[in-house]
């Protein structure tokens, strides 16, 4: 009996030793795997980016081989009759290596036909999707206008914005003006007060769809955004771009990572796209690094002709030359330095070629004329002058394609100012001077 007990105890001890060895091997394997994973995370940049990149199978060369991602974004709503209304048309781009992005708004009334004198509403770009629900036709038109070879589109239903904003607990945004508008045919009712506030999904929809207010019989006008902000469609597109930036910024908060499942469900249920998941997932790890300060925004340049010239149809006619220049600066020359532009012969170095905008924020009307006079005496051309909100410091903001020597000379000429750089190479103005209270 004792022999059996001794044998059993020896057997138990052997099993314990075996299990200890197995456990040790498992722990060692976990430690090695963890060490390898940690090493790869560091090689992929560390932090959340490195972890996500490692989890989807990236190495340190994956990001380097990723090009700029460009996509046409269409925001659509539905009226009571079930027709699709294109409220937002925008080209979006993102470069994971430079961490820069671009949003180019395209007015809904942009004319896509050949003869403006015989224009019809069906030739407006916002009608292309609504007629057949075919985003590829809109994509083709946008590529024709911009000269870009955009391959992807994303059609976002209004419900997506509402659900996303609600999913992340609302978005804090500074509503630029009081907004009051009612359209029973679309079941659209907008009622927002100006000022910073937390917007839920319903209010977010009101914000991005506001173009102008209800008819005011006293002024006999439809109240809209002020001219300096950009009235009607221009104002709406600016608000849309600024709100999108806030949505991106607030969605990217660490606490919202745990809501990724809910966010993906919103996209799945409300997104029509030809973006391949394998393509999209390669960019996701690097978006968490993105800073919305690196978004460059613009609107397609053009004019709204008199109705007598366009068959009594309100259309927007884009300027082909200015559009080509704008697309070049937004998507092709974005990462070029002043030295690169100088080498290519595209850097402006002559006073006679500079177009200056002067904005008076000093609160003293005489300062505006004084600055303009000094500039003209030195051979500069002032193309625009206006007043703006009061500011303490005078700043001289130069576009990317203007030599730093020019901005330095302007500061010396007016006797005040801090030099700042802009990503823009706009043909409308090369230098913007904001006169502050420090100007004497």
Image (tube, helix red, strand yellow):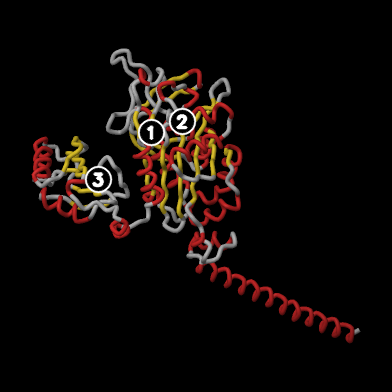
Q: Left of 416 or right of it: where is 71?
A: right
Task: Give the residue displayed 37% in from the left and 22% down from the top.
Answer: 213
What kind of element bears circle 3? loop
Could you say whether the residue bearing mark 1 is in a helix, strand or loop?
Answer: strand
User: Residue 55 versus residue 103: which sits nearer the camera?
Assistant: 103
The mark closer to the camera, 1 or 3, is: 1
Position of residue 350 measured from the top left corner of the image (x, y, whole percent): 19, 51
Q: Residue furthest bottom?
A: 3
> Within 10 Å of the Cα at label 3, are there few (<14), some (14-19), or many (20+) other Cα atoms?
many
Q: Is label 2 in a helix, a strand or a loop?
A: loop
The residue nearer to you, when weighing 217 against 315, is 315
Residue tagged 3: 430
Q: Which residue is mark 2?
A: 112
Q: Which mark is residue 318?
A: 1
Is residue 58 shown left or right of residue 191?
right
Task: Tell me the quadrant of the picture where the C terminus can be found.
Answer: top left
Residue drawn at x 44%, y 38% as measured from the top left = 145
């Amino acid at each position: 009996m004792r022999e059996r007990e001794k044998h059993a105890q020896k057997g138990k001890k052997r099993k314990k030793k075996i299990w200890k060895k197995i456990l040790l091997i498992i722990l060692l394997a976990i430690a090695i795997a963890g060490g390898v994973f940690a090493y790869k995370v560091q090689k992929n940049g560390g932090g959340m980016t490195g972890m996500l990149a490692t989890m989807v199978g990236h190495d340190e060369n994956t990001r380097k081989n990723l090009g700029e991602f460009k996509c046409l974004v269409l925001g659509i709503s539905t009226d009571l009759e079930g027709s699709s209304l294109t409220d937002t048309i925008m080209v979006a781009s993102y470069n994971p290596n430079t961490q820069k992005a671009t949003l180019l708004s395209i007015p809904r009334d942009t004319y896509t036909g050949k003869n403006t004198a015989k224009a019809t509403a069906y030739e407006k770009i916002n009608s292309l999707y609504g007629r057949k629900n075919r985003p590829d036709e809109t994509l083709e038109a946008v590529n024709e206008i911009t000269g870009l070879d955009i391959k992807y589109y994303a059609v976002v239903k209004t419900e997506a914005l509402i659900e996303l904003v609600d999913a992340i607990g609302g978005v804090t945004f500074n509503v630029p003006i009081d907004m009051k508008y009612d359209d029973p045919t679309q079941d659209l009712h907008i009622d927002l007060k100006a000022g910073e506030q937390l917007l839920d999904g319903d209010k977010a929809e009101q914000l991005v769809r506001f173009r102008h207010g209800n008819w005011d019989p006293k002024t006999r006008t439809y109240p809209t955004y002020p001219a300096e902000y950009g009235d009607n469609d221009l104002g709406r597109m600016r608000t849309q771009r600024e709100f999108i930036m806030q949505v991106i910024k607030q969605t990217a908060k660490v606490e919202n990572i745990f809501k990724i499942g809910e966010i993906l469900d919103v996209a799945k249920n409300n997104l029509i796209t030809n973006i391949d998941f394998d393509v999209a997932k390669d960019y996701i790890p690097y978006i968490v690094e993105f800073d919305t300060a690196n978004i460059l925004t613009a609107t397609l340049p053009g004019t709204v002709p008199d109705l007598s010239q366009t068959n009594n149809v309100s259309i927007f006619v884009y300027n082909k030359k200015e559009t080509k220049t704008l697309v070049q600066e937004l998507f092709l020359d974005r990462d070029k330095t002043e030295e690169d532009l100088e080498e290519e012969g595209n850097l402006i170095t002559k006073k006679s070629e500079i177009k200056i905008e002067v904005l008076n924020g000093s609160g003293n009307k005489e300062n505006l004329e004084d600055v303009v006079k000094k500039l003209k005496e030195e051979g500069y051309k002032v193309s625009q002058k206006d007043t703006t909100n009061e500011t303490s410091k005078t700043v001289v903001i130069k576009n990317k394609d203007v030599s730093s020597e020019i901005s330095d000379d302007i500061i010396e000429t007016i006797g005040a100012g801090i030099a700042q750089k802009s990503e823009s190479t706009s043909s409308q103005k090369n230098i913007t001077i904001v006169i502050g209270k420090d100007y004497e």
